[in-house]
Image (cartoon, rainbow, N blue to C red):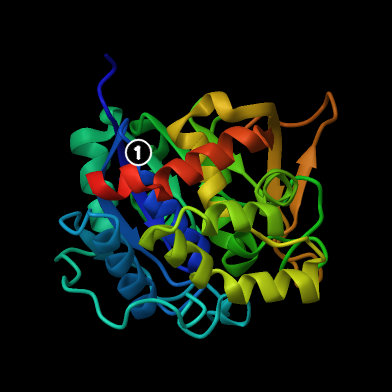
């Protein structure tokens, strides 16, 4: 039997991040070693609050949660509260966690764990890459030290969710994303973008009913915290339901076999105001060295099974 996957998760805990944390906490084949929080979907204190609530709900309340950067490297924080609700959870989360954040800044924790346990740890990033970039500025080889890094980041087809061409996590701190890409190699770093999510992780009304029909507290929680995103999908992106980009990235980290189409690519990030956060993918033969693996399609049925299993009565009883 293979040893459990040991996860280090960096999150700006909005509603879909919370679902990703649930997937990780309920996965029999994984343990969460630590969670680090970053400003993004919501301000940093709310992101930490939401992470604590979710871990406690999932039966993982002993996982240490460390607060990190409260703003992008060079820019003013612009949250996604217009998407996820003012609390990031559609106003549906429990009001108070039992626990509190653990001592130690997220960047220091990332560096310490990379140096002491890196080969055993899989890093999964669910928000803007500010904490990771700040750590890279202190250790250029950070990403090489981990077993692998999976990032929910970008939109490889150029169709954005925060602008016409940019995905929110990259747009929120494009300089941080550029630093990560500059240090990445495709054997060590995989990006799962919004292009895969809107194709393969949309909770259509039929899928929402299957989730609701589980009748568990976890399934109810997932449905309720995503109602603001469901409205935003209808009004803005035109999807037939809310999509789950962060859980999709977590699912691939938990089971890389879910990936159906991958591409090793040479990727940069646009930093100018007009195209801020857009991925610039150079597929020419004369391009610079490949720096990241992109997941372009994921097994939708396999992803849904993982979600339903995590929210089902058996997983809830085991938590």
Residue at 56% across, 81% down: 81
Give above or below for 185 relative to 164: above
Q: Quadrant of residue 302?
A: top right
Residue 44 is left or right of residue 101, and the answer is right
For residue 35, which quarter of the picture? bottom left
Horizontal placement of 52 versus 220: left or right?
left
Residue 68 horizontal/vertical position (percent): 32, 67
Which residue is painted at 31% across and 75% down in the image? Answer: 49
* Residue at horizontal 21 percent and vertical 46 percent from the top: 112
Residue 294 visible in the displayed image: no
Image position of 135 (left or right of 64): right
Total numbered labels: 1
Question: Could you say which is closer to the camera, residue 24 or residue 58?
Answer: 58
Secondary structure, mark 1, is loop
Residue drawn 43% across the image and 66% down it: 221
Q: Residues within 10 Å of mark 1 (few under 14, many from 20)?
A: some
Residue placed furthest toward the top:
1
Residue 71 percent coordinates (x, y)? 45, 75
Residue 104: x and y, percent? 18, 63
Residue toward you, 105 or 64: 64
Which residue is identified by label 1?
A: 27
Q: Is residue 85 visible?
A: yes
Q: Quadrant of residue 242?
A: bottom right
Vertical comparison of 293 with 281: above or below: above
Q: Tell me if residue 219 comes above or below residue 26 in the rendering.
A: below
Which quarter of the figure is the N terminus placed in?
top left
């Amino acid at each position: 039997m293979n040893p459990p996957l040991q996860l280090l998760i960096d999150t700006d805990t909005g509603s879909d991040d919370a679902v990703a944390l649930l997937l990780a906490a309920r996965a029999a084949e994984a343990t969460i070693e630590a969670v680090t929080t970053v400003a993004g979907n919501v301000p940093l204190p709310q992101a930490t609050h939401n992470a604590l609530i979710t871990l406690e709900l999932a039966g993982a309340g002993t996982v240490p949660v460390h607060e990190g950067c409260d703003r992008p490297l060079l820019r003013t924080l612009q949250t996604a509260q217009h998407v996820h609700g003012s609390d990031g959870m559609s106003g549906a989360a429990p009001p108070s966690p039992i626990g509190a954040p653990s001592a130690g800044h997220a960047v220091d924790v990332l560096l310490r764990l990379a140096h002491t346990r890196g080969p055993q740890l899989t890093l999964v990033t669910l928000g803007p890459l500010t904490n990771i970039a700040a750590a890279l500025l202190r250790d250029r080889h950070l990403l090489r030290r981990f077993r692998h890094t999976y990032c929910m980041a970008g939109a490889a087809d150029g169709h954005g969710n925060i602008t016409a061409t940019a995905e929110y996590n990259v747009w929120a701190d494009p300089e941080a994303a550029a630093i990560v890409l500059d240090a990445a190699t495709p054997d060590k770093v995989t990006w799962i973008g919004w292009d895969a999510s809107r194709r393969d992780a949309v909770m259509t009304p039929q899928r929402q009913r299957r989730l609701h029909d589980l009748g568990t507290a976890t399934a109810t929680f997932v449905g309720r915290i995503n109602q603001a995103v469901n409205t935003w999908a209808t009004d803005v992106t035109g999807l037939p339901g809310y999509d789950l980009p962060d859980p999709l990235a977590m699912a691939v980290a938990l089971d890389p076999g879910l990936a159906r189409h991958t591409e090793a690519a040479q990727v940069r990030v646009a930093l100018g105001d007009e195209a801020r956060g857009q991925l610039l993918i150079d597929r020419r033969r004369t391009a610079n060295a490949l720096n990241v693996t992109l997941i372009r399609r994921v097994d939708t049925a396999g992803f849904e099974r993982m979600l339903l299993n995590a929210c089902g009565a058996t997983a809830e009883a085991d938590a």
